[in-house]
Image (cartoon, rainbow, N blue to C red):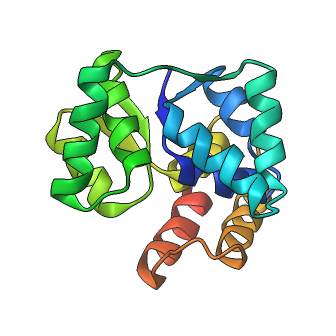
């Protein structure tokens, strides 16, 4: 059961595809800071995706897991030392605390830190490709999702965009 940072949840919810996480993994775990970022702060800013994520938490397929006081201190130190945000640091620490190798995280620096700590970071693009491979979505839907992510300000450089389109076609 993977751990997720905020970004994959926010972007998938913003394009009405959050349910793919449930389809692919059955359940997702998040640390308290990710819940705060995605739901509390999202609702305060008027983001509709916050309500979608909140509903998934209410339905218990996204679960919030507490982090020990010691690990909260570790996550704060990691965030301060590396410049990643506290939600990313908590997600990484929660994965280590629960001995869960798979972590859903998009930011490059946070992914590198997760890899360095022995985790297997996967991002939103992985979700699209995996859902396509498993026939949960069509190739056309995958391409549409990719374009909608970009419209929603998901950062994707041109090379990764082209490589992703090619990967979708090769499935």
Q: From this view, report whether residue 170 is shown above or below residue 152.
A: above
Front-most of 128 and 163?
128
Q: Extreme bottom residue here?
A: 158
Q: How many labels does the image show?
A: 0
- Horizontal side of residue 71 vs 153, given as left or right: left
Q: Where is residue 79 in the image (x, y as percent from the top left)?
A: 26, 51
Q: Say which residue appears at 60% left-offset and 38% top-offset.
A: 35
Q: Say which residue appears at 66% left-offset and 54% top-offset.
A: 41
Q: Say which residue appears at 42% left-offset and 80% top-offset.
A: 159
Front-most of 117 and 145?
117
Q: From this view, report whether residue 134 is shown above or below residue 156.
A: above
Q: Where is residue 24 in the image (x, y as percent from the top left)?
A: 64, 29
Question: Is there any visible trace of residue 129 in the rendered image?
Answer: no
Q: In which quarter of the image is residue 108?
A: bottom left
- Horizontal side of residue 115 vs 72, given as left or right: left
Q: Quadrant of residue 134?
A: top right
Q: Where is residue 60 in the image (x, y as percent from the top left)?
A: 73, 18
Question: Is there any visible trace of residue 83 in the rendered image?
Answer: yes
Q: Say which residue appears at 75% left-offset and 51% top-offset.
A: 13
- Horizontal side of residue 100 vs 132, given as left or right: left
């Amino acid at each position: 059961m993977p751990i997720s940072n905020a970004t994959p949840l926010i972007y998938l919810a913003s394009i009405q595809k959050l349910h793919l996480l449930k389809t692919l993994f059955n359940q997702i775990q998040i640390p308290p800071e990710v819940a705060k970022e995605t739901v509390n702060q999202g609702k305060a800013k008027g983001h509709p995706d916050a309500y979608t994520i909140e509903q998934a938490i209410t339905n218990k397929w996204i679960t919030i897991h507490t982090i020990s006081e010691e690990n909260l201190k570790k996550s704060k130190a990691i965030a301060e030392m590396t410049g990643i945000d506290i939600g990313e640091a908590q997600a990484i620490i929660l994965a280590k605390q629960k001995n869960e190798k798979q972590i859903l995280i998009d930011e490059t620096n946070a992914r590198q830190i997760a890899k360095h700590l022995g985790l297997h970071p996967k991002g939103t693009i992985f979700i699209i490709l995996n859902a396509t491979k498993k026939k949960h979505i069509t190739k056309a839907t995958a391409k549409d999702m990719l374009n909608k992510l970009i419209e929603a300000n998901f950062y994707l450089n041109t090379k990764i965009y082209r490589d992703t389109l090619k990967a979708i076609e090769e499935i």
